[in-house]
Image (cartoon, rainbow, N blue to C red):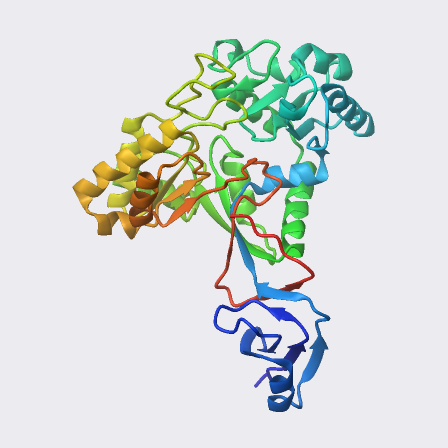
Amino acid sequence: MTQITSKLLVNGRIYSPTHPDATAMVVRGDIVAWLGTDDVARDQFPDVDVQDLDGAFVAPGFVDSHIHLSATGLTLSGLDLRSATSRAECLRMVGDYAAANPGRPIWGHGWDESAWPERSAPNTADLDAVLGDRPAYLARVDVHSALASSAVRRLVPQLPAAAGFAAQQPLTGDAHHLVRAAARDLLTDAQLAEARSAALEALAASGVVAVHECAGPQIGGLDDWLALRSLQHGVEVIGYWGEAVTTPTQARALKEQTGARGLAGDLFVDGALGSRTAWLHQPYADAPGCTGTCHLDPDAIEAHLRACTEAAVTAGFHVIGDAAVSAVVAALERVVDELGVVAVARCGHRLEHVEMVTAEQAAKLGAWVSSPACNPVSTHSGAASTGCTPSASGRIEVAGSTRLRC
């Protein structure tokens, strides 16, 4: 029989609701066996190996409850534009990256014109002047609009007819999804493997032991999700697939086909505030006549919720604007009235990014939905966690500091 070794960790700051003053812990194998203070620990466990934590914070492993691993990794290992402070600097960073990576498709992320002096993004002509005929896809920080060079745009013949198309300005809606898919197809296997590895290593270094990959046809596609699902790594990858269904049979079949935990995550009801695509009741103050984008109409929302509830499958949506929240809450209410609150609540339906919600809506969601993920400082960057919760994995992580967003 293999002997299980024990270790005493002392002089730390141990997170525990039941032992708020704990500074020491005993770990037996991979199980936390005891919590308490240093002096009591040394008396009770005099013969075990001791590790001095030197004041470090100890917490359960974290679960990142909403992430896009490949996109996160592409930011970590590729072109990260979040530090750009002007349109000129953004273009310089794009040019420098292109020069340093000849022959590689250019996939960038993170520009945010809202704080730039010009308060406007580069246009297609600006990109082409820097890149020539190089294909480039550059997502805004919220990933609901993107700049695209002419070389990428030409890969999508139907692009000019798509909703959200603009010849010189960032693409939104269907046009953005079409260009993103075309750009994704240009990425090499080596780029994607490097990106996924970078994302998982960064997560592990931050004390994350599991992630909820919010996959879908408009995120990375089925091939990307299946590749992520097959990865062997210390960070567990749990997947949700964002694709609408209309019948319980479809729900069960799609869950089986994808191997996902549920048909939730980023099934888009709307977009994001920064890209002016979050679906609002009233027009944007700086965009008269624009109320955002409705990607999934109320009937489709209700059909998806009903089908998944009847199939006992977790459903969910990406929902940000107040009109989008209203549509989802109204659909949930109708399904609750029809199938009962127990049938709905037991499915653990999820809502991602909920930002514009009234107190009355919040009370209803609290009764019906297990995971309304509210992100008040939401950038949807893909490169940062958009919601972490302590896991029940039993694993531990030791770190000098831990930042938690919720």
Q: Front-most of 183 and 61?
A: 61
**Which residue does the image show at 60% across and 58% down from the upper left?**
234
Left or right of 88: which side holds 334? left
Residue 246 in view of the camera? no
Residue 381 in view of the camera? yes
Q: Which picture quadrant has residue 298?
A: top left
Q: Which residue lies furthest to the left in this view?
A: 338
Q: How many labels does the image show?
A: 0
Q: Front-most of 399 and 107?
A: 399
Q: Which picture quadrant has residue 14?
A: bottom right
Q: Front-most of 312 and 145?
A: 145
**Which residue does the image show at 43% across and 38% down from the upper left?**
354
Q: In which quarter of the image is the N terminus?
A: bottom right
Residue 384, x across and y down, in percent: 61, 43
Residue 343, x across and y down, in percent: 23, 49
Left or right of 259: which side holds 19? right
Residue 258, x across and y down, in percent: 43, 43
Q: Is residue 10 above or below residue 105?
A: below
Residue 140, x across and y down, in percent: 61, 27
**Which residue does the image show at 66% across and 16% down from the upper left?**
149
Q: Is residue 213 above or below residue 79?
A: below
